[in-house]
Amino acid sequence: MSASVSRREFMAGTLAAAALATFEPARADEPSLRQLAAQKGLLYGCAASSNFLAADAPFAALVAEQAGILVPERELKQYVVQKKEGAWDFSGAEALAAFAAKNGQKFRGHTLVWASALPPWLEQKLGNNPSENLLTDMIARECGRFRGRVHSWDVVNEAVVPGFLHPDGLQTSSPWYQAFGEGYIATAFHAAREADPHALLFYNDYSVEMRESWQGGRRTAILNLLEKLKKQGVPIDGFGVQGHLKPFLEHFDEEIFAAFLRDIAGLGLKIMITELDATDHPGPADPAQRDAAIASLTRRFLDVSLDNPATIGVLTWGLSDRYSWLSMDPSRKWPDGQLSRGLPYDGDLKPKPMREAIAAAFKARKAVGQ
């Protein structure tokens, strides 16, 4: 998921005053989320933006304390690193990688190939008798630069849209698909493995956890894609479940989700929850009621996720509501000015029931080997 650059810039300005809030570190007897996860052989981390970490010391301290793995929210997407052809900008990603190294955190790459992250010049070239080097050289440049520093890459992001032209549900409107056919997916994974041999390589996608019938089509399409890649010998290591929960719009079903994860694990793939958050619209006006519903669904979702031994980690798409993409989306703004409450910490960097739910899920998970 992403928000536009202009929205992020607007967010940075409008929330600047919030940075004055005082961060209260966890009590000595209260383990961090990264510690609780590590105790069970898991990773916990979050997405972050380099500008917010640089400008907001209390927020940066919270991220350093709570996250064991860091992923750029936007700094490795193509419209950022290649705004102009031949002009590469890794400054934001390097700042995040340096922050992670300084704080003993792993670093994750997101995302190499995504139809919604293309700069205009690249989209134009893909539509004009393109060379496959546009894909492979890009991946070689990104993966090569961070080789040995990245725990895992989201190599391909959101490549399925069931119900359209492709019999297997692939997104045929993607410029990558239109340029190179469905083979672009396998090509991307091979290029990533060659450029960064030791990083885990993931396919990442959304809306697979609820019982709505249209999500059933997504699960089928994703499983078909992953099974095909495995049969072709494509070097894919795992599947990323984005986990953008909607407690007031959709219906979670433990059995359906558990069966899907078993199918993923049955392909020999690791599982990672990569972008966990929750939309609190259209929920009750009382934030306490919304917090309770979000915490309840988060716990149910994570209990199923962590019950599968193939699951290796959980990342929330942000850490505090102060900088959440949900808080900057006009369709999710509350009339009284409240921020969206879809992350573990609120806009004042105080823990919410969602944080307690994540901690409880980690505590309840059986350690590796048990």
Image (cartoon, grey):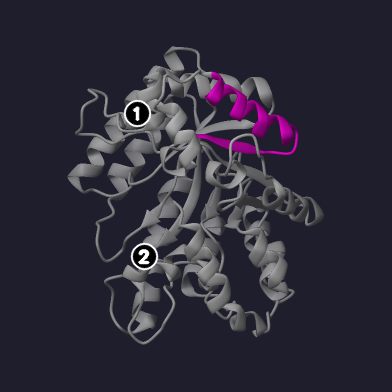
Q: Name the residue furthest bottom.
A: 336
* SS assignment at label 1: helix
Residue 64 falls left or right of residue 282: right
Element at label 2: loop
Placement of the C terminus among the 4 image quadrants? top right
Q: Which amino acid, by three-letter code, is at mark 1?
A: Leu
| Region rendered in magenta | 133-156
User: Which sits in the foreground, 78 or 312?
Assistant: 78
Task: Say the numbered circle drawn on residue 160.
Answer: none
Q: What whole-number distance in Å separates the C-alpha atoms at marks 2 and 1?
A: 26 Å
The picture places residue 304, in percent across and down from the top left corner, at 41, 48
* Residue underneath mark 1: 223
Q: Is residue 278 above or below residue 92?
A: below
Dots 2 and 1: beta carbons under 8 Å?
no
Query: Which amino acid is tagged 2?
Result: Thr
The residue beneath circle 2 is: 279
